[in-house]
Amino acid sequence: MPEENIDEIIQEILSEEKKVDEDQGEEILEPEELYECPVCHHQVSEDALFCPYCYAVFDEKADYKMLIDTIIKKLKKLIGFATEISLPLSGVNENIREAKMYAAKDDYPSGYSHLQNAYFTVVKGLVDYYQKELEKYELMIGVNPEIRDLYSKAGVYLDEWDIESFINTFNELKERAAEISKDLKQYLEELEAVERAVEIANKFNIPTEKVLNIIDTAKDMAESRKYEGAIKVLNEAFMPVKDEIEKAMTSFLQVVKEEVTRETFSGKSNAKTIIRAVREMKVYHDEGNYLKVLEKMGEIEELMSQQE
């Protein structure tokens, strides 16, 4: 039996697609007719008895007692959220009192009307407040995919007036944004320190081309919002030139030693400060922290220049 060509096999498989479609068929559903709720302006089904967003009643056949129980449960949480952010609830308590009064008379439609007004006031106030809060993070949606997804998800919950789900997502968004802001701040501080150390290295004739290349790599990572990785790269920026730093440090310390031991230097206030700085530099050197070593070399040089 001749061996079949791969392309021929693929074509045979693809040719079965039409048969599968004919056998299974796809049920085509008519799109549901929607119309705008006159109270909250959400799109709702044309045969809905009430709005699932603001609970406005469209048909007297609605179960008022069930709706009252539903709104009361939701209102307890929503009023709690509103209280936490000191949101004004003008007229809400009055509407709730009116609702209770009518309910006591078994006039559920009238009582429900007041309760629905209270619910609408609270949820609309929360939506307006949190919409402004969410917009504060609009500039951060380009920071990383997680921020963008959380922002989009929170926006959907807010559009649907699902306040509880929104708050949970929004809190997660704020925490992640705070972490990124912290990383960004640390990155900028590290970058400033490394660039300052490069200037010091140049004064001591330490070649810094490799360091500058590493700085460029860190900047590229930061452009992609990879701040943690950029910080790590900057922390190790001077490792490729550690041998050159060691040589410069050795020569520099010889000069410092001569200066400290000079008779004219004794009794000067900077002597103890320089010796302390040398001790600190030794600690950084033992740790392999060449960034701090360079900073101390610059500090000591400045102190010595004050003696002249």
Image (cartoon, rainbow, N blue to C red):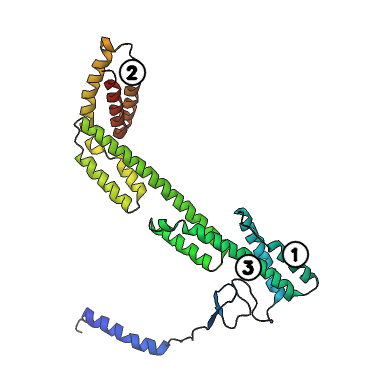
Please indicate whether residue 45 sits to the left or right of residue 96 in the image.
left
Q: Report the residue at 28% width, 15% height from top.
A: 260
Q: How many marks?
A: 3
Query: Marks 1/3: CA distance?
Result: 15 Å
Q: Is residue 83 above or below residue 281?
A: below
- Residue corresponding to mark 1: 97
- Residue corresponding to mark 3: 120
Residue 40, position in %: x, y?
58, 72
- Residue corresponding to mark 2: 270
Q: Can the viewer see residue 184? A: yes
Category of crowding for the residue at label 1, using alpha-carbon neighbours closer than 10 angstroms: few (below 14), some (14–19), many (at least 20): some
Category of crowding for the residue at label 3, using alpha-carbon neighbours closer than 10 angstroms: few (below 14), some (14–19), many (at least 20): many
Residue 269, position in %: x, y?
35, 16
Q: Is residue 5 above or below residue 144?
A: below
Residue 195, position in %: x, y?
28, 39
Q: Secondary structure at mark 1?
A: helix
